[in-house]
Image (cartoon, helix red, strand yellow):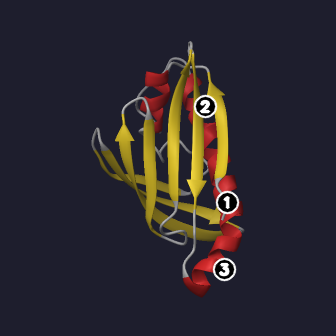
Amino acid sequence: MKEIKDSILVQAQVDRAYQVAEEYPLFVDAFEKKEILRRTDKRSHVRITNRFFNLPLTWEGKGFKRRNEKIAWLQTEGLLKGFKAEWRFIPQGEATEIVIRGLYKGAGPWGKLVEAIAPLLVTQGTKKILHFLKLRAEQAPWSSSIK
């Protein structure tokens, strides 16, 4: 699979955009089920269920964080196990550019089959994440409790 990359400009300073991103997946209203299993300043562990062509897909992932700079995600359970995504936070004056790059490389016959549908899954998911992250970060008055 080739690399998937998307970005968005958020009208919020980098610390605010990053603080919302730390609440992943809670801010993504489009996800059916979402929970943060564990979170520290350096790491996160999440579980998400989303529908793809009306089929529920559940996965878990771990995030490795560098405050206000990046979150590197690794899917540890689920259809795209081994999928890697890096979220970068780039200050642009009073705004922040958020760039998400993802890569999945399947292994074996099953992995190659999954690799064929991975771009659709990843592209769709990335667009949702960026959309809802922008909405929450630009929300006023801003609250750290994402619902």
Q: List x then y, in percent, for residue 131.
A: 65, 38
Above or below — where is 76 with respect to 136?
below
Secondary structure of residue under mark 3: helix
Give the residue drawn at x 70%, y 72%: 116
Which residue is tagged 2? 134
Secondary structure of residue under mark 1: loop
Work out how far the residue at label 2 is from the one at label 1, CA to CA, in angstroms: 26 Å
Which is nearer the eye, 144 or 59? Answer: 59
Q: Can residue 34 be seen in this view?
A: yes
Q: Which mark is residue 113?
A: 3
Crowding near pointer 1: few (<14 within 10 Å), some, many (20+)?
Answer: few
Q: Does label 2 or label 1 sit earlier along the sequence?
A: 1
Work out how far the residue at label 3 is from the one at label 1, CA to CA, in angstroms: 15 Å
Disc 2 marks a residue whose amino acid type is: Lys
Secondary structure of residue under mark 2: helix
Q: List x then y, in percent, for residue 138.
A: 58, 23
